[in-house]
Each structure stands twice: as structure tokens, then as C-alpha cells.
Amino acid sequence: MIDDLPNHDDATPRSQTMIMLTGLYLFMLLMTLMSYGQPIPVFGYILEDKAARIFITIDSLFCLYLFLGLWQRQHLTWILLLIYNGYEVLNILVNLFLVSHNELERILERSIDPRGMLFSNLFTIGIVLWISRVIWKQREQFNNNSPYLF
């Protein structure tokens, strides 16, 4: 059954943009792994201790899947990348309005400039939307229709 699936590695050359996206999501995987055990805001709630570790583990596994799917140019990964980026934008917006500055200052144990935080979050949203646009434009590069990564 697996022998019937076409090998798409040689079908079309990998574009420089796909190489950049693969590296970017590898970097995101590493950054997610490095935040293991740290408090993390998720849709207005600050997850700490065990809840934060469980969330980071799940997020890391998902980022690993995205990285491997980009490497394999899996079509399902193209859809999941857009959904994941939408989740990231929505999470940033919700946290921006629901997590208080006092709560963030308590967690980070330092003062936070509200305008700087607003600017950096809006800038991050802009970057994620730009990356989503790049992913959308690269949809023909995701030509592996196999449901399996390997």
C-alpha cells in the first residue's frame, strides 16, 4: 500500500522560501522547547507549573510535526501551518486584552512598559500574518498528499 504512494522528493525542486520556512519552524520548535517549565499565557490565563509543562510538551510536539511536515512538503502541513498561525494571532490578541500588566509583572518579576508591550505584540501579529501570506503563496510546493510523514 505504501509502495503505491508517489515519491514527491524529486518531483519539483524545493524553493528557497520553503527552505527558509523549514528553518523558521525548526527555530520555533527550539524556542518552544527552551520555554519548558516557564509560565505561559494562553487565551487570557497564565499557565504555570504542571499545566505549563504539559502545554509546552503538546506545543513542542505540534511544532515538531510542522517542521517534519515542511521537510516532507506534506499538504496537510500547509493547512495546519495556517491554522497554527491563526491560533497564534488569536492567542496574542486575547492575551493582550485579558492578561493584566500587573499579572505579567508578577510573573516576570520586573516592570513592563504597556506601550512597548502593545507595540511588540502588534509587531509580532504582523510578522505572523506575513509568514502566513508566504505559506499561502507556497501552497503548490506542498505537493506530498500522503497522510504519513515517513
Image (spheres, rainbow, N blue to C red):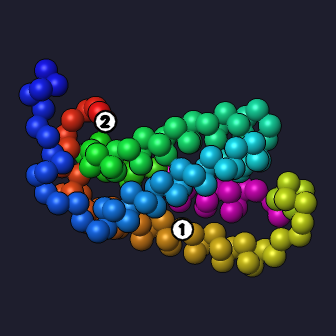
Prevailing secondary structure class for the magenta stretch in the rendered image: helix
Q: Is residue 123 left or right of residue 21?
A: right
Q: Position of residue 48 (x, y in %)?
A: 79, 41
User: What residue is disc 2 on?
Assistant: 149
- Residue displayed at 48% across by 54% down: 26
Q: Amino acid at mark 2?
A: Leu
Residue 121 shown in magenta: no
Quarter assignment of residue 124: bottom right
Question: Can I make out residue 102 in this image?
Answer: no
- Residue density around tag 2, few if under 14, some if 14–19, many if 20 or more, within 10 Å: some
User: Which callout, 2 or 1, points at the residue further toward the start of the chain?
Assistant: 1
Q: Which quarter shows the N terminus?
A: top left
Residue 90 shown in magenta: yes
- Residue displayed at 46% across by 61% down: 24
Residue 25 drawn above or below residue 149: below
Q: Position of residue 45 (x, y in %)?
A: 73, 46
Q: Position of residue 19 (x, y in %)?
A: 33, 62
Q: Is residue 58 left or right of residue 9?
A: right
Q: Are marks 2 and 1 in contact (CB under 8 Å)?
A: no
- Residue 125: mark: 1
Q: Amino acid at mark 1?
A: Ile
Which span of residues is magenta-colored? 85-102
Secondary structure, mark 2, is: loop
- Residue 84: mark: none
- What is the C-alpha distance between the residues marked 2 and 1? 29 Å
The foreground one among 4 and 82 is 4
Residue 114 drawn above or below residue 31: below
Q: Which quarter shows the C terminus?
A: top left
